[in-house]
Image (cartoon, rainbow, N blue to C red):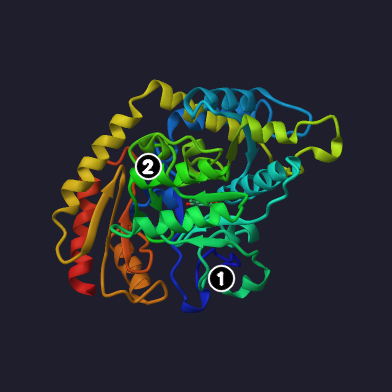
Amino acid sequence: MSSVWHPFTQHGLQEPIPCVVRGEGAVLHTTDGRRVIDAISSWWVTTHGHAHPRIAAAIRVQAGRLDQMIFAGWTHEPAEEVAAGLRAIMPASLTRVFFSDSGSTSVEVALKMALGYWLARGDARHRILVMEHGYHGDTIGAMSVGQRGVFNRAYAPLLFDVETIPFPAAGAEQATFDALDRACAAGAAAFIVEPLVLGAGGMLFYSADVLRRMRDICARHGVLFIADEVMTGWGRTGTLLACEQAGVEPDILCLSKGLTGGALPLAVTMASEPIFEAHWSTDRAKMFFHSSSYTANPIACAAAAANLAIWREEPVLARVARLGAAQAARLATVDGIRNPRVLGTIAAFEIGAGEGYLSDRAPRLMVAFRERDVLLRPLGDTLYVMPPYCIGDDDLDRVYSAISEVLARHR
Ligand SMILES: *Cc1c(COP(=O)(O)O)cnc(C)c1O
């Protein structure tokens, strides 16, 4: 009997917990000898594949050289290399790189930077604008700027107030622009949004044009624009960043998940020069008060540096394009689904008639996929396929035949 308490798992339902011993590319091998296709990139983190040789080698070397050290007032080569590498490929206006260890903390850091910016300008602002159905992590601040619901009901009294802008559903975009314009005019510190795809909210897509216009509205009012690309970054939507497709440069950018290729926990919050300058002073009371023990852990940074080298030296975007086309071709063969859609490496669609996240269909489907050696985890009524970029055609075929088979039985 294991003592492990698993995340997002109802132990009372005695969900079976498979044990994995080895990962390779898009495949996980279990202790009982099963070869499972990881069709969701282990919750959206694995980009180039599990146990990628270049990333694993970088981790091995760094672990024998410098494992961990304080990052307040000290630095090390892997962190400097990652910061320089990010500067070279991320939007030019994002001149500063602040390290932390998860997507949630990168969001907390972004929010604190935004508030610090306004305080330093002598115009203290605390109102954060968010998008309906948004998700930014599970810490208290990150939950506060995310969609309220069953996930955070127990903590609702502790979550801070935000102003929610309606999701720009196709045909109703003007309502989003109007609400954002009004909220910005009333005075807000920042607007935080997932560019092009709201992941945990149900793989909801909106257009690059909408993103561009939302950014313009914020700029017109001087409200900071925070792009949470924790999921959408690193090629997921077809480009390095989703923001690129809209020609948008955010004031603050959150990156994690694929930053190390998915090998180790690491995050960065990138900020534009005015945000850094707002905290620059000879007064210690005005420094940016945030740190965690493992900030810029050298081994995690070495993994991120290896990921950056892969992006520089290998045709990653061509792999992404190939996977996108392969997904679209297979998705077209699935019958009886609603709203099939593909963006970059992400394919998604709806099943059933809108029973919601807690309906027991999603867990039943998950078990049915697991029995077919496919790792998929529906989000309520939304089923999505988001594999590592290296997945082979045969394995992708297996994923889609499992989907067709399971849907035919469990509809
Ligand atoms: C996953 C996710 C987060 C949280 O990242 P963690 O590393 O799980 O804390 C934040 N924002 C978005 C958009 C995400 O998809």
Residue 393, label in figure: none
- Check disc 1 and report the residue beneath it: 1
**Would you say the residues marked 1 and 2 are in contact, meaning their CB atoms lie under 8 Å apart?**
no
Q: Is residue 42 left or right of residue 405?
A: right
Neighbour class for label 1 at 10 Å: few (<14), some, many (≥20)?
Answer: few
Q: Amino acid at mark 2?
A: Arg
Residue 345 lies, with reference to residue 19, above or below; the image says above
The residue that appears at 49% across and 29% down in the rendered structure is 90
Across and down, in percent, residue 275 comes to: 66, 36
Whether residue 95 is visible: yes
User: Which of the two discs, 1 and 2, labels the residue nearer the N terminus?
Assistant: 1
The N terminus - image quarter = bottom right
The C terminus - image quarter = bottom left
Whether residue 31 is visible: no
Residue 236, label in figure: 2
Neighbour class for label 2 at 10 Å: few (<14), some, many (≥20)?
Answer: many
Across and down, in percent, residue 231 comes to: 45, 47
The one nearer the camera, 174 or 212, is 174
The residue that appears at 43% across and 26% down in the rendered structure is 310
Element type where label 2 sits in the image: loop
Element type where label 1 sits in the image: loop
Q: Amino acid at mark 1?
A: Met
The residue that appears at 25% across and 53% down in the rendered structure is 341
Q: Nearer the viewer, mark 1 or mark 2?
A: 2
